Amino acid sequence: MNAVTPRARFVRGFVLSILALGIALSASLVLGAGDVSAVRAARALFGSDDPQAWFVVSELRFPRTCVGIVVGALLGIAGNLLQTVTRNPLAEPDLLGISASATAAVALALLMGADLVAIQVWVAVVGALGGCALVLAAARMKGVGDDPVRLVLAGAALKGLLVSLVSLILLIDQRTADEIRFWTIGALAGRGFDQLESVLIPLLLGLALTIAICKPLATLALGESVASSLGQRPQLTRWLTLIAVALLSGVAVALAGPIAFLGLIVPTLARGMAGPDIRRSLPLCALLGPAVILLSDVIARVVVPPSELPLGVVTAFLGAPILVAVVRLRRTSLGKG
Amino acid sequence: MEELLHTAHRSAQLSAHDVVLGYGNRTVINGLSVTLPEGKVTAIVGPNGCGKSTLLSALARLLPPRSGEVRLNQRSVFSMAPREVATLLALLPQQATAPEGLTVSELVQFGRQPHQSWFQQWSREDQHILEAALRAADLEALADRPLESMSGGQRQRAWLAMTIAQATPLLLLDEPTSALDLGHQIEVFELIRWLSVEGGKTIAMVVHDLVSACRYADHLIAMKDGVIVAEGAPSDVVTRELVRTLYNIECELITDPLSNSPVLTQIQRA
């Protein structure tokens, strides 16, 4: 293996990601479950006089696509941050129960009578932060943190616990049940600019924090002592990263509910294209995340017409094989070492 | 050595003053003072668990002393910002690991980090120093190779190149050759030696092998049970008694005719 410099590799990955995003974006606007054909939708996009098709594209699919772009980018970035900070290629906001923590926090808040829609996203962020703290504690524990698969198992246990807690709340409180359904099933359908507007502040905070910690985090990948000796503060970096993950995944859950595996699929692809340096893989995550979620959403719309599959089902179908592949790859490389 | 990498003109006084060091409720070193001779290679030797790596951690600002002080150019190292320390002192920990796929050049670039700010990212000077560091470690031809594809000696040279790019007057190394075979050990030791002689660096390294320590260091610090039992030029301080104290073995000492450093023969358990 030689000749390809990291920069050339990054440029190639960048171009590929843009292409993928372009294809996904067009597909998301043009393809759907309804009876407006792809050709009619495409024509409407380019200005033909077809009010029905135009309504479908601009009022139904466009907002949904925009939310998809944001959620995809958020989960892709959050997954990459989490994997880097735990040094575990399987760490993923949903698999580790961080999304479930956000949902559980919102359910609890609703149960206790909070009804301010505006603060829901903050409740979700705080819940996600709680989940992150548990993940960090587990990752630093001997016997759990040093084995990628065990950390995921611990996360699955946490997630199971939280999901049943939420189910319990749904059973005892009808009002909560109506409002929380939105939070328990991952979907883009019916989401639009109102939701985007309500999460704008935590969204921007999360992205700004991500940009600020990019470099320290890349250094942390060399190990704690090396990072310290290069002038970093590893402990601070770790906490800021988890706050960023909480903001990003809390916002993602508030927008689209828990969507499994996206935070695993996207960073795995991005690192494959750009190499291990997070400063190169993060921009690709921001492009590939939307591409993957939009393609999944399109698949969800078209496989069982006229109804739609839940988005989470599609991402699980795409993500599970990647999970298995990463585990197998790690196992063989560990065996060699 | 290229001028860019010269550090001899910058002062590099690193010393510990009556430091007490430990982890949790275990005390490893109870009151120890030491000064690294400037511009020299110092080897810290001693049996396993004698506290040599612990001492190095404290000197590198990784382990805060419970009492006492580590001073860098007359200032307490823990009162200085990590970034400032990083421009004066570089560390290569034991068996450092890089993420899979990282190339030599990418690794060495990290060495410039303490010199960069948020606004000024990668400057022309950084690029020159990167190239000079790769040349110094004889890694130009391998610059774009991923680390895991190289030999242990080459990999260790790449890590050293990172510390060279850091351009610090002080360099601390924790067992820089521990996982290497003899040929690769020599390759790494010679680079370290060269960094001191040609680059003017003050270097301290924890070394397992007493003979290598004598061969490549100007100054020896021998430790046992958290205490310095002997200190000075290898040919002065290494005696049969010292070897017995440190490792509990009997031996004869002869002098290597080429390097004039002491060599152990007829080794047996005491």
Image (tube, coloured by chain):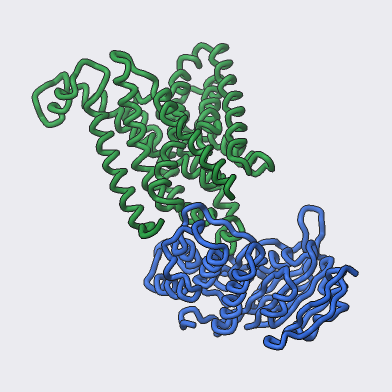
Instruction: Give coordinates of residue B51: x percent, y percent.
Output: 77, 65
Q: Is residue A218 visible?
A: yes
Instruction: Give coordinates of residue B52: x percent, y percent.
Output: 75, 67
Residue depicted at x 70% and y 70%: B207
- Nearest the camera: A68 or B220? B220
Left or right of A41 on screen, residue A106: right
Instruction: Give coordinates of residue B92: x percent, y percent.
Output: 60, 66
Residue depicted at x 86% and y 79%: B240
Letter of the blue chain: B
Q: Is residue B116 above or below residue A132?
A: below
Instruction: Give coordinates of residue B66: x percent, y percent.
Output: 77, 62
Residue depicted at x 36% and y 26%: A188
Q: Is residue A123 visible?
A: no
Letter of the green chain: A
Image quarter (top left, top right, bottom left or bottom right) of the C terminus of chain B: bottom right
Farthest front residue in view:
B266
Q: Is residue B85 above or below residue A167?
A: below
